Amino acid sequence: MMTAEQMMAAHKANVETLFGLTSKAFEGVEQLLALNLQVAKAGMSEVAEHTKATMSVKDAQELLSLQAGLLQPAAEKAAAYSRHLYEIASGTNAEVAKITESKVAEAQKNFTAVIDSAIKNAPAGTENAAALVKSAVAAANNALESVTKAAKQAQDVAEANFQTLNTTAVKATQAATKAARR
């Protein structure tokens, strides 16, 4: 049984963890807002520049050349935006995962301590039941570790696919721009 002091300490720790997670989430939102503001400001100045350049075009060939020249930088900027967006999301996710993993590990340790204490104080003749409970707890812990490893592997695969997609998109745009200029 937990004492009132232990329960209050656990509750206080849980509230601190909640505020820590909330703080990490807000940091991610702040980074996302800063990125979007930066993109919006850059976009506004680029639109002004492109409008001026378009207004000074003398013929259709010059217009096509101007448009072809705008295609590649736009694709590269979109890829850079996607990379920054992914970095913000994955960084925030990593922070939340780190906090969550430490809390899960702590909870597992406490639960195992409670089970061990209950087994030590169990009446004689319940050794088989105690072994079964310990086995079930170990199996649950192993399953949780397997799920955690699988999730990390899936995240690594998604990140690799994202990087490949970004690289491929930029290369395709570069090739299309070169072809359009010819």
Image: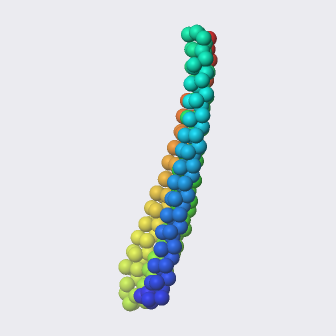
- When the figure is inspected, residue 121 is found, relative to residue 148, above or below; the finding is below
Quadrant location of the C terminus? top right
Q: Where's residue 80, x and y in %?
A: 60, 38
- When the figure is inspected, residue 152 is found, relative to residue 53, above or below; the finding is below
- When the figure is inspected, residue 72 is found, relative to residue 89, above or below; the finding is above
Q: Where's residue 137, x and y in %?
A: 43, 71
Name which residue lies at 53% across and 67% down: 20
Left or right position of 87 against 131: right
For residue 67, which quarter of the picture? top right
Left or right position of 172 against 136: right
Q: How is the image coloured?
A: rainbow
The front one of 19 and 142 is: 19
Name which residue lies at 52% across and 59% down: 26
- When the figure is inspected, residue 63 is found, relative to residue 115, above or below; the finding is above
Name which residue lies at 40% across and 75% down: 133
Quadrant location of the N terminus? bottom left
For residue 39, which quarter of the picture? top right
Q: Is residue 57 visible?
A: yes
Name which residue lies at 51% across and 76% down: 13
Q: Where's residue 162, x and y in %?
A: 54, 39
The front one of 65 and 146 is: 65
The front one of 23 and 55 is: 55
Q: Is residue 116 visible?
A: no
Q: Where's residue 73, x and y in %?
A: 61, 28
User: How many marks overall?
Assistant: 0
